[in-house]
Amino acid sequence: AQSVTQLGSHVSVSEGALVLLRCNYSSSVPPYLFWYVQYPNQGLQLLLKYTTGATLVKGINGFEAEFKKSETSFHLTKPSAHMSDAAEYFCAVSDQTGNQFYFGTGTSLTVIP
Amino acid sequence: DVKVTQSSRYLVKRTGEKVFLECVQDMDHENMFWYRQDPGLGLRLIYFSYDVKMKEKGDIPEGYSVSREKKERFSLILESASTNQTSMYLCASSSIWSGGEQYFGPGTRLTVT
């Protein structure tokens, strides 16, 4: 079975500072990887995904993530945090069919003015 | 755009009531999922379905059942609601051809009193 670990359930950054949210996975085969964002009282929205090809993936709202197979990591970054980035972020891993889909426990991002 | 809708955003029920949560997707997706989300626990899979009339138990199926009579509709049933089922319920769908990406509804916040 696959698993996803998000380091840090709460992360605080200053407005304009780098955002780094960490995600590690365990998988015996190359997985598909995702980051989702959830704003208060809403469903999850896809930020970006990695399936195959280029390991640096760009998503919406200026976020990007890099798939590092040797480190089994898929960390999410954004060069400059905005107040509107305050939300819950979930990393997820899937097999190719989507039938086996696993979420991390989430990281709550706070942006300090 | 893919749209996943849930029948209610907020629901208040009494202990012992039978509760139906409905989810409809409009993109002909094969897979549909029900999660519950609780603070500090992330998303936990209750049930999923990969085809009409097919269902598979997730991590926490106890106290729940599901129904999928049509491809676009996936219902979650709480046979006898209890206070420990107070939670946010999220429905999602995915296609087996889209690398597992899940599309989420807005969620139903259920309170059982």
Image (cartoon, rainbow, N blue to C red):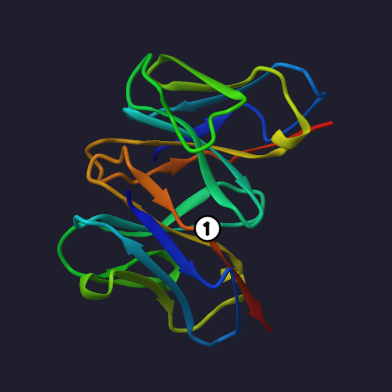
Q: What residue type is labelled 1?
A: Thr
Q: In this view, does B99 lie to the left or right of A5?
A: left
Q: Which residue lies furthest to the left in this view?
A: A53
Residue at point 40% right, 38% down? B2
Residue at point 75% right, 28% down? B82
Residue position for label 1: A105
Q: Which of A17 and A70 is in front in this view?
A: A70
The relative height of residue B14 versus residue A15 in the rendered view (above or below) is above
- Location of residue B29 (image quadrant): top left
Q: Which of A84 and B44 is in front in this view?
A: B44
**Number of marks in the rendered image:** 1
Q: Which of B35 and A60 is in front in this view?
A: B35
The subunit carrying tag 1 is A
- Location of residue B52 (image quadrant): top left
Residue B98, position as x, y percentages in the image: 25, 43
Residue B22, position as x, y percentages in the image: 57, 23
Residue B83, position as x, y percentages in the image: 78, 33
